[in-house]
Amino acid sequence: MPESLRPDLRSVKYFFLSDGWTTGRVWEFGGLWNELAWQRKPIMKKLGLCIKEATEQLWLYQVEDDVLMVEVLAEDTTATPIGQVVLKRLITADQVIEKLCSSDAAMTTQLELAALNQLQDGSN
């Protein structure tokens, strides 16, 4: 497969998601992600980096560039539902690095440092 078509080599976007929340549906340019048309699920992974803001831990997620919006859902289904939440503003690697550097409580482990280095290499 040509390198330009490999999903793992294309540019990526990021978002932070609080503990207790999970991802749901995904949208791309043509609308809701269509696994039959794409012949795969969207590339989305939770990285091992998080920041602490107030009482929340916000985990960093990486998604492929074709993703425009991500629905997020509360994992606790017994609580009163708050409705649909869709992340429409995904951020770049430079914005992630800025957020991590400005956070008083950025938390990483040795394993996650490799992910951070990969993130920094991808932003150059």
Image (tube, rainbow, N blue to C red):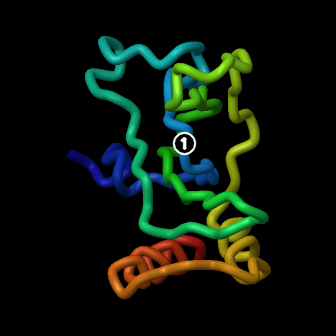
As drawn, is 107 to the left or to the right of 1?
right
For the C terminus, the image quarter is bottom right
Q: Is residue 46 above or below residue 71?
A: below
Q: Position of residue 101 (x, y in %)?
A: 72, 83
Q: Position of residue 31 (x, y in %)?
A: 59, 14
User: In the depicted view, which residue is nearer to us: 116 or 53?
Assistant: 53
Q: Is residue 68 above or below residue 19?
A: above
**Residue shown at the point (35%, 14%) measured from the top left:** 37
**Residue shown at the point (70%, 54%) measured from the top left:** 91
Residue at the extreme front = 78
Classify 10 Å Cα crowding around label 1: few (below 14), some (14-19), many (20 and above): few
User: In the depicted view, which residue is nearer to us: 6 or 106?
Assistant: 106
Residue at the extreme left = 1
Q: Is residue 108 above or below residue 95?
A: below
| Quarter of the rendering containing residue 57 | bottom right
For the N terminus, the image quarter is top left
Mark 1 sits on what residue? 20
**Residue shown at the point (42%, 43%) measured from the top left:** 44
Q: Position of residue 45 (x, y in %)?
A: 40, 50
Q: Is residue 97 above or below residue 59?
A: below
**Residue shown at the point (33%, 28%) measured from the top left:** 41
Q: Position of residue 85 (x, y in %)?
A: 70, 25
User: In the depicted view, which residue is nearer to us: 55 or 116?
Assistant: 55
| Quarter of the rendering containing residue 100 | bottom right
Q: Amino acid at mark 1?
A: Gly
